[in-house]
Amino acid sequence: MARIPTAAVAAAGLVGGYGVARWTRKRPLGGVALAAAGAVAARQWQRQTGTAGAAALTGLYAAAFAGSHPLAKKVGAWPSVFAVSGAMALASYVVADRRG
């Protein structure tokens, strides 16, 4: 089975988590989607980059989630989510996926 790039998993977790929370109006459900994707990505980051890389990317994933909230007050919810998802995907690609 083909491996899904962690950049896609992480970005999908951020976008999907927000989408689930918004459309179901149940924030904890969005948190479950966000956490599940984060766990899948973190496991792959661990395999690809070791503990330090996985810790850095997992921290960035959490920071992207947290940072999307104040950013949303300035640019809107969806633009904020897409911006932090893009940044997270780029970081994940550079640190983990580019290596193969």
Image (cartoon, rainbow, N blue to C red):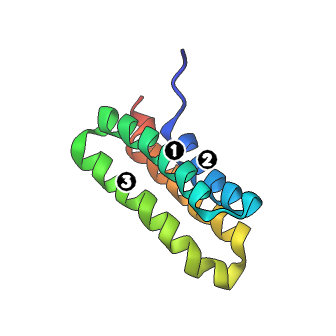
What is the crowding at mark 2: few (fewer than 14 residues within 10 Å), some, or many (at least 20)? many
What is the crowding at mark 1: few (fewer than 14 residues within 10 Å), some, or many (at least 20)? many
What kind of element bears circle 1?
helix
Tell me what residue is drawn at x 52 percent, y 34 percent.
Answer: 5
- Which x, y percent locates residue 6? 49, 39
Under mark 1, the amino acid is Ala
Under mark 3, the amino acid is Thr
Tag 3 residue: 58
Q: In which quarter of the image is the N terminus?
A: top right
Q: Is residue 97 above or below residue 95?
A: above
- Which x, y percent locates residue 70? 56, 81
Tell us which disc is closer to us: 1 or 2: 1
Q: Give the alpha-carbon distance from disc 1 to disc 2, as whole Å.
A: 7 Å
Q: Give the alpha-carbon distance from disc 2 to disc 3, as whole Å.
A: 14 Å
Tag 1 residue: 37
Under mark 2, the amino acid is Ala
Tell me what residue is drawn at x 55 percent, y 19 percent.
Answer: 2
Tag 2 residue: 12
Tell us which disc is closer to us: 3 or 1: 1
Marks 1 and 2 close (CB-CB < 8 Å): yes
Tag of residue 93: none
The mark that comes first in sequence, 2 or 3, is 2
What is the crowding at mark 3: few (fewer than 14 residues within 10 Å), some, or many (at least 20)? many
Direction bottom: furthest residue: 74
